[in-house]
Image: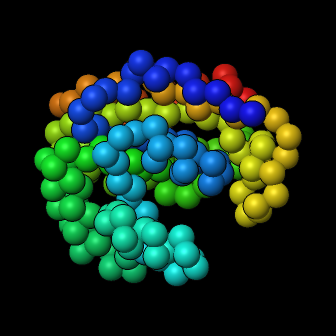
């Protein structure tokens, strides 16, 4: 079973959605809940049968990590364009699924997107990794909670926004766990 908390924090305008990532569950649910949204994802996901074709058709933002700073510039330009077109951008700031209770590893890319797009961030905490663990499609019985949190305002400096994202998501994720 699952529940969604904090839906009242989801704005009716484009934002950056920064979510904890523990399973495939939130990938599907966030896309359903956040209207007019796109994901930032690694290019390798295009190679997953059927799902990869869906990503290509959906015009998501793909990152080729092998391209380094060139990939970052391309991603920032695409993100800025998507936000100006009215699309919210869903990103997993740790870059990959994490097991519950793993130490956090937030990447700086989200700070660049935040600065470039000059938009608010909607943080999301969750506990889905207990029911749908990393590296398996086998699901365990349990109750998943997806918790939307207060918006993080624009115009914070780089280190302040990174600390804020990590602290609010990790604190609430730990409460859910």
Q: Quadrant of the C terminus?
A: top right
Q: From this viewpoint, is residue 167 visible?
A: no
| Residue 134: % across, % down | 72, 57
Task: Using the rendered view, name the quadrant where residue 42 is placed.
Answer: bottom left
- Residue visible at 59% across and 32% down? 146
| Residue 141: % across, % down | 85, 40
| Residue 62: % across, % down | 36, 69
In the picture provided, is 136 more to the left or to the right than 159?
Answer: right
Foreground: 69 or 153?
Answer: 153
Foreground: 139 or 93?
Answer: 139
Q: Quadrant of the N terminus?
A: top right
- Residue visible at 18% across and 31% down? 155
Picture layout, residue 65 above or below residue 99: below
In the picture provided, is 52 more to the left or to the right than 177?
Answer: left
Q: From this viewpoint, is residue 86 visible?
A: yes
In the picture provided, is 12 more to the left or to the right than 32?
Answer: left
Picture layout, residue 153 above or below residue 140: above
Outermost residue on the right side: it is 141
Task: Using the rendered view, name the quadrant where residue 74 is placed.
Answer: bottom left
Foreground: 157 or 92?
Answer: 92
- Residue visible at 55% across and 50% down? 28
| Residue 32: % across, % down | 47, 44
- Residue visible at 54% across and 51% down? 27
């Amino acid at each position: 079973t699952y529940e969604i908390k904090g839906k009242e924090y989801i704005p009716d305008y484009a934002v950056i959605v920064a979510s904890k990532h523990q399973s495939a569950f939130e990938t599907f649910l966030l896309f359903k809940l956040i209207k007019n949204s796109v994901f930032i994802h690694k290019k390798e996901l295009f190679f997953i049968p059927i799902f990869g074709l869906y990503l290509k058709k959906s015009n998501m933002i793909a990152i080729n990590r092998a391209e380094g700073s060139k990939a970052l510039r391309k991603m920032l330009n695409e993100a800025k364009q998507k936000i100006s077109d009215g699309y919210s951008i869903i990103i997993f700031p740790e870059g990959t699924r994490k097991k519950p209770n793993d130490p956090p590893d937030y990447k700086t890319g989200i700070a660049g997107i935040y600065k470039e797009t000059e938009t608010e961030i909607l943080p999301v905490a969750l506990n889905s990794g207990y029911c749908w663990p990393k590296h398996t499609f086998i699901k365990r019985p349990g109750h998943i909670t997806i918790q939307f949190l207060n918006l993080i305002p624009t115009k914070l400096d780089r280190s302040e926004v990174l600390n804020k994202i990590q602290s609010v998501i990790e604190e609430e994720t730990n409460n859910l766990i």
